Image: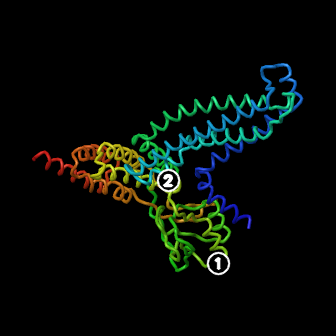
Amino acid sequence: MWSNIRIWLQGHYNKIINSIAFYPAFIALLFLILSCLVIAFDFSEEGKEIKSQLHWLSLKDASTARSIISAIVAGVISLAVFSFSMVMIVLNQAASQMSNRVLDKLIGNRFQQVVLGIYIGTIVYALFLLSTIRGIDSGIYIPALSTYLLIAITVFDIFLFIYFLHYITQSVKYKVIIQRIYEETKAALERSCQLQQEPSEATSLQGDQFIFATSSGIYEGYNKRSLIKLCDENDCILQILHTSGTFVLEGLPVLQVSKQIPDEVKEAILNTIYLHNNESVEGNFFYGFRQLMEVAIKALSPGINDPGTAIESLRALFQLFSYRACYFPANTIKNKENKARIITKELTFEMIFADSVLPIWDYGKNDRLVQHELQQLLTQLQSIAPHAIIGKLLQETQKSIKHNNAL
């Protein structure tokens, strides 16, 4: 039971961490704890002593403290509403002119989530502080120290808002979004492709022992440690039948097993396989390639007609190809005793290239800017990875350029 719970938590870890509500909720909780600690100090003997010695830190009138806190709450709520109205405008613009796929990058932006968390935390702090004010004659029991700290936090929120305005105007730039996709994809690519020599083709398993999907979803990898442990315990080899990013229908095979194993073990193995409704670059680096491809195609559409953005996407793609051409993913995962336990199915360089670059060429083959940029990029990439598909596309671009120059 505990093993299944641990596997479930590991499988949903990225989904929880990348949720737009995770950081705001966590930061708001920290502010709530801060308010409890500061108010407790405010009402402690040390706090009373400080307020009695420094008269300018004391508030004699409870209504004054309530007015200050109420005004701060209203102001910070307005800041939060205005800030994230701007975020919604940015999301709408990115979705209409680039691709819906890039929304995850903007929604999941850590800085935006931290800003939202600080605003919410300030509101939580102020409301909790407001509930502790006591209307008595002596100002000692009014949380003056906590109120002045709230004022300082509010001043910080205002400066944070000013910086947020600058940040949001920069983040809407296409080059910034493309660079963010590239960096995230490069990091996922480096985690998946670490071999400097291409591994030999793995031997496929024989037999008819399969594990079938209990629900439809996009295959995005597996829990390596748990899956190897299950293979060791049952002395079997597993072969994953799909590449990352493949949508698997319910009832179809996901894995092949080297021997007959009990149904409860099959269920445990299936729990280590990630079948999600949404894709992520962390689980599938090819999703980043596809995002860059979709941005380029959308930019080349007649409604947008922005070849400059398409060229930016192509440059990012070819930087990723230059890495993938030199490093390869492992297709056989071994345990500590160097026994093969998991056989994976990986996307080849040619498959990634064909699915990412050829659609852009189909849309931009008549655009002179795209033709010349592709010719330069293909020439450089061919010197790194002399694949046949690169040479063939390079010949097509050269023919198109000659045809246009002859007009």
**Which residue, given by chain and number where applicable, does mark 1 sit on?**
263
Q: How is the image coloured?
A: rainbow
Quarter-of-image position of residue 115:
top right
| Badge 2 vs badge 1, beta-carbon distance below 8 Å | no
Q: x, y percentage for residue 383?
A: 31, 45
**Which residue, given by chain and number where applicable, does mark 2 sit on?**
281
Name the one closer to the observer, 51 or 321: 51
Q: x, y percentage for residue 384?
A: 34, 46
Q: Is residue 194 visible?
A: no
Which residue occupies 45% across, 36% down? 170
Which residue occupies 71% across, 33% down? 67
Examine the rendered structure and indicate whether residue 347 appears above or below residue 214. Answer: above
Q: x, y percentage for residue 204?
A: 48, 71
Task: Please name which of the two marks, 2 or 1, marks the residue nearer to the observer.
Answer: 2
Q: x, y percentage for residue 160?
A: 58, 32
Q: Is residue 270 visible?
A: yes
Residue at the limit of the structure toward the right, as seen here:
45
Which residue occupies 46% across, 65% down? 246
Which three-letter amino acid code belongs to the residue tagged 2? Val
Name the one closer to the observer, 265 or 137: 137
Label 1 element class: helix
